[in-house]
Image: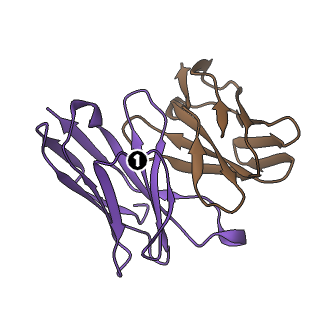
Chain colours: A brown, B purple
Amino acid sequence: GQNIDQPTEMTATEGAIVQINCTYQTSGFNGLFWYQQHAGEAPTFLSYNVLDGLEEKGRFSSFLSRSKGYSYLLLKELQMKDSASYLCAVRRYNTDKLIFGTGTRLQVFP
Amino acid sequence: DSGVTQTPKHLITATGQRVTLRCSPRSGDLSVYWYQQSLDQGLQFLIQYYNGEERAKGNILERFSAQQFPDLHSELNLSSLELGDSALYFCASSVDGGTGFNGYTFGSGTRLTVV
């Protein structure tokens, strides 16, 4: 089976940096995805890690350690519009099915 | 516009009824996935179709069924509806698997309310 854990809620201040962690337990790991979801809207793709290390994309970066079953999403220079849920999802070998964690709801305050 | 089209956007129906949700995948995508998202719950995988064939199944209730048609659009049928079926239902599509797979593109969802 699979188990994906994320904090339920986080708060941060505009302009700050926040790190959202995700730990997972799965056999046949084949990639980890981060999605952003504003309330009532569709999830949108943020990042994809399949190898260990850091992937940087503008204000957002994602890190993966396969040996530790751990990933984080780093958001820099926070803006009010970054208030959303951030979903961690894992893919296994021989499947395109993504299993999602319950998401971390981030609130950014001025 | 993500390129994945879901209809209807909102649906209100009574318990015991049956509804059909429709999804058209992004052009070129052969896989369609259905997910259910209840209030304060994560995305729960229901079922995947690839080029008309069922490829993977999650915890989909027996009251629910789906299919993918030759034009690649998909329908999710929900019957004998219960109050607990009220949720957001998302469809997503992707390119073929293997090295070409780089995640999903989601539709805007159908919000189902069972009263």
Q: Amino acid under label 1?
A: Ile
**Residue where numbered disc 1 is placed:** B60
Furthest toward the front, the residue is B62
Left or right: B57 as drawn, with respect to B20: right
Foreground pick, B57 / A80? B57
To which quarter of the image does residue A103 belong? top right
* A18, B61: nearer the viewer: B61
| Figure disc tally | 1
In the rendered image, residue B111, in percent from the top left (x then y), is placed at 27, 43
Give the residue displayed 54% in from the left and 58% down from the top: B104
User: Residue B72: x and y, percent?
Assistant: 38, 75
The residue shown at (30%, 51%) is B64
Quadrant in the rendering for residue A17: top right
Query: Looking at the image, is A89 positioned above or below residue B40?
Result: below
User: For this view, does B26 lie left or right of residue B113?
Assistant: right
Dot 1 surroundings within 10 Å: few (below 14), some, or many (20 or more)? some
Up the image or down, B95 lies above or below B88; here it is: below
Residue A74, image quadrant: top right
Left or right of A90: which side holds A63?
A: right
Q: What residue is shown at x 75% (from left), y 42% (from top)?
A: A62
Question: Secondary structure under badge 1?
Answer: loop
Q: Position of residue A37 (x, y in %)?
A: 49, 40
Q: Chain of mark 1?
A: B
Q: Residue B58 appears at what percent x and percent y? A: 49, 49
Q: Which quadrant is the N terminus of chain A positioned in?
A: top right
